[in-house]
Amino acid sequence: MRCTLQTKNSSIIAEVIVDRFHIVEYLNSASNNFRIQEMKELKTDGHEAILHLYQDV
């Protein structure tokens, strides 16, 4: 997918290229960061029983 962006100053024209690989890479990274954050919160809140379930996956 190609999108052409034009600002108020018409001398600057930028083209943004979006492809599936980078979208999936971004989504995987975001979900992994969210998972890590949630695991840290569970650990600090003392939910060790729940964490044990996710270690086998």
Image (spheres, helix red, strand yellow):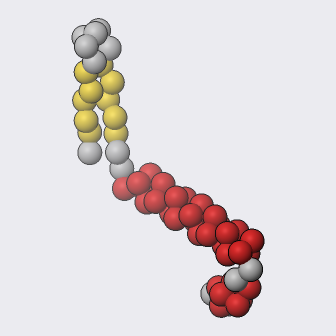
How far across and down, in percent of the image, does residue 51 sit? 69, 84
Front residue of this view, candidates 21 and 52: 52
Front residue of this view, candidates 13 and 57: 57
Instruction: Let me know if residue 55 appears in the view.
Output: no
Residue at horizontal 44%, vertical 52%?
22
Residue at horizontal 32%, vertical 14%?
12
How far across and down, in percent of the image, does residue 50 sit? 65, 87
> Where 10 falls versus 19 (above or below)?
above
Q: Examine the image and state in which quarter residue 18 appears.
A: top left
**Could you tell whether 40 is left or right of 20 in the image?**
right
**Could you tell whether 5 is left or right of 36 in the image?**
left
Q: Examine the image and state in which quarter residue 33 appears.
A: bottom right
> Where 9 falls versus 21 (above or below)?
above
**Could you tell whether 13 is left or right of 43 in the image?**
left
> Where 29 falls versus 5 (above or below)?
below
Front residue of this view, candidates 29 and 20: 29
> Where 16 falls versus 43 (above or below)?
above
Front residue of this view, candidates 41 and 16: 41
Question: In the rendered image, which quarter contains the N terminus?
Answer: top left
Residue at horizontal 56%, vertical 64%?
34
How far across and down, in percent of the image, does residue 10 sit? 24, 11
Residue at horizontal 55%, vertical 59%?
29
Instruction: Let me know if residue 38 appears in the view.
Output: yes
**Could you tell whether 44 is left or right of 57 in the image?**
right
How far across and down, in percent of the image, does residue 43 sit? 73, 75
